[in-house]
Amino acid sequence: MSDSSRMAAAMRRPSSLPDRNGYFGEYGGRFVSESLMEALYELEAAFRKAWADPTYHREMNEVYRDFVGRATPLYFAEGLTRKLGGARIYLKREDLNHTGAHKINNTVGQALLALRMRKKRLIAETGAGQHGVATATVAARYGFECDVYMGSEDARRQSLNVFRMNLLGATVKPVDSGTKTLKDAISEALRDWSHSVLSTHYVLGTAFGPHPFPLIVRSFQSVIGREARKQILRKEGRLPDALIACVGGGSNSMGLFFPFLSDLECVLYGVEAGGRSLKPGEHAARFQTGKVGVLQGSRTYVLQDGDGQIEKTHSVSAGLDYSAVGPELAYYHDSGRISFVSVSDDEALEAFETLGKTEGILPALESSHAIAWAIRKARDLGPDRVLVVNLSGRGDKDVMEVARIKGVSFS
């Protein structure tokens, strides 16, 4: 089968995936302890029942409108476009959501599920802190107890978000094992959930982990792409030539890409963390050097050594600093539908400043990776081309870390 035939076959019915066992082709599944299987079955049943219920959607959409602030704008970045002299760049402004990122789309949906399942407590993992803040926010709104697991290295570089979670009534539990980053936080959250499933719902924050989490998170986050599709048709009268999103686990990228998967004229770019270099331990570019394996409940691309041991990762952005990637993204990588690229720490930091100076917008360091790739692509394209970039979060949380890297002191 040719590459074009393989892509066309993969795109016939995107909504039919995952299959009944939670697989996107060969990726996905439920690789967890027996103690979690019943919880996953319960969650899938609750989600499918809710997703088919118009009352659930009415309630969720009301919260999106009145609490989250949706729909978010699709903003023409005129200053950046003019500076580059190439393609027209639009930003999907998820940074304008309540709490400052796309993560609240998912936590609202999962909190409403937890209420239906009569759970009393929410737990979550977080890397950049935005998912932790969003989980703490919905816990406060709906009256849940809330514990958030966070690698101690991530807690150091995202101390502002740690304080925000505490102010919202959540307990942040630092994780000192392993690399002290997102991977280790997920492991601790899964361990907690295995002992507390009767009273606790695990609000996993990205399109990763055991089925049905990749399905659930993609479903809630696809509001991003549905809005963007309508908005770009109104503004430009056509679909974009390319869509660009950063890729950690996959929540913001699948959220933007999913409603465009069948539009083969739109090129989809997933931007990974190239870190300092592509040497082991210096990056988090899973599709560049990773191999297929199983990690934290899912079969997907994983950064691992020749013995199958998980490699250390690095990124200037805590939210991209993870050794595996969502199984649905792995499927679309193999089919060729999504092109995966990487951006270095230095490029991301430069994009962080460039967007601030041209548009008055400081993007999250995660989103800065997508901005950096858009800058690179726009320069090569003519003004008749259109790019849409998912600005998945705002950069307030990263200002102190950027200052530290640049050697700026405020004392």
Image (cartoon, helix red, strand yellow):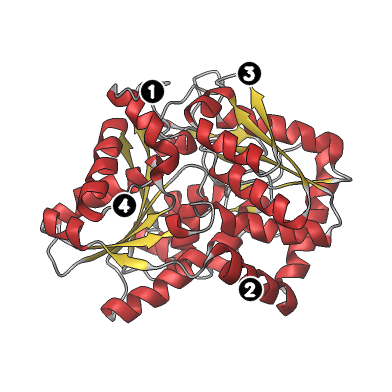
Identify residue type, mark 4: Ile
Say few, some or many: other residues with alpha carbon within 10 Å of mark 2 (under 14 / 14 to 19 / 20 or more): some
- The residues bearing labels 4 and 2 have C-alpha atoms spaced at a distance of 28 Å
Whether 186 is drawn above or below 20: the answer is above
Q: Is residue 357 found left or right of 368 in the rendered image? A: left
**Tag 1, which secondary structure?**
loop
Front-lying residue, 38 or 187? 187
Q: CA distance from mark 1 to mark 4?
A: 28 Å
Image quadrant in which the C terminus is located:
top left
Tag shown at residue 62: 2
Q: Residues within 10 Å of mark 3 (few under 14, many from 20)?
A: some
Q: Are marks 3 and 2 in contact (CB under 8 Å)?
A: no
Residue 296: image quadrant is top right
- Which residue matches tag 3? 177
Who comes first in sequence, dot 3 or dot 2? Answer: 2
Residue 311 picture location, percent across and down: 50, 22
Instruction: Using the image, tell me which numbered label, if any, was put on residue 361.
Output: 4
Give me the residue at 89% from left, 45% from top: 198
In the displayed structure, would residue 162 be above or below residue 279? below
Quadrant housing residue 114: bottom right
Observer-nearest of 41 and 188: 188
Residue underneath mark 1: 282
Q: Are marks 3 and 1 in contact (CB under 8 Å)?
A: no
Quick one: 201 or 219, which is closer to the camera? Answer: 201
| Residue 194 in the image, given as x and y percentages of width and height | 81, 36
What residue is shown at x 39% (from left), y 68% (from top)? 73
Q: How much space separates mark 1 and mark 2, taking CA atoms?
A: 43 Å
> Could you give the CA–CA distance between mark 3 and mark 1, rounded to whole angstroms?
19 Å
Residue 94 shows in the view = yes
Q: Is residue 252 left or right of residue 232?
A: right
The residue at the point 34 percent across, 78 percent down is: 233
- What SS does tag 3 mark? loop
